[in-house]
Amino acid sequence: MNGRHVLLVDDDAALLRVLTITLRAHGWRVSTATTGAGALHATARESPDVVVLDLGLPDIDGLTVLAHLRQTSEVPVVVLSARRGREDKVDTLDAGADDYVTKPFAADELMARLRAAVRRAAPTDETDLFVESGDLRVDLARKRVHRGGLEVRLTPTEWSFLEVLARHRGAVVPPQEILAQVWGPAYTTEVNYLRVYAAQLRRKLEDDSSRPVHLLTRPGQGYLFE
């Protein structure tokens, strides 16, 4: 029993019933919402550990819901959608989703992705471990990063990507290693995830995202935090 709390957001009542039964049988506490507005209210009221979000909601598009969540919360968001196009996935990750699962899906795969999303957001037991580079200060214990003395809000997945590179400061980390550490062994071919998240981090952490000095790409080798 893991005791974690998941908010399921989907207007498909049958799917919500099946997922609720399955997740509760594996120890999850489950809340549900069938609209975007309901999802925003439930997230603010209940502070779930992870949100499963459908993109095709009846009142507000899922991407709009995601944008509102990212303005107010760092809760991990796993998008569950019938939209299967690569562009849909990239746009959704770029908007701040932590993962993207396409329908139809296997329940055990969804649960594995939920567990991974929650792990990425969990606090660490380390105390007083910092990595500094220029005006960046990465606090590995508290999962915080400051730029020029001001805290920069990162999603759990953005943080996990940065953390892997910061822990290997000055060394090139291969794409497969980053994918395995951040998302899990099943993701080692999802190199588009890395391009999306590297771009997001550069927009937040670099003075000029087109000419990064901290988060660098080594073509054919991997990524480097300098």
Image: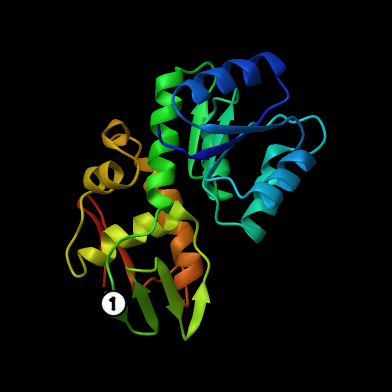
Q: Residue at x 48, y 18 (%)?
A: 105
Q: Quadrant of the N terminus?
A: top left
Q: Residue at x 43, y 43 (%)?
A: 117
Name the quadrant containing residue 77: top right
Q: Position of residue 200 (x, y in %)?
A: 48, 58
Q: Is residue 206 left or right of residue 89?
A: left
Q: Toward the viewer: 129 or 202?
A: 129
Q: Residue at x 47, y 86 (%)?
A: 149
Q: Position of residue 98 (x, y in %)?
A: 48, 45
Kind of residue sitting beneath label 1: Asp
User: Is 59 above or below relative to 216?
Assistant: above
Q: Position of residue 129 (x, y in %)?
A: 26, 74
Q: Is residue 97 left or right of residue 15?
A: left
Question: How many labels sit on residues?
Answer: 1
Q: Is residue 54 left or right of residue 205?
A: right
Which residue position is annotated with label 1? 128
Q: Toward the viewer: 5 or 224?
A: 5
Q: Quadrant of the C terminus?
A: bottom left
User: Is 12 above or below relative to 130?
Assistant: above
Name the quadrant containing residue 2: top left
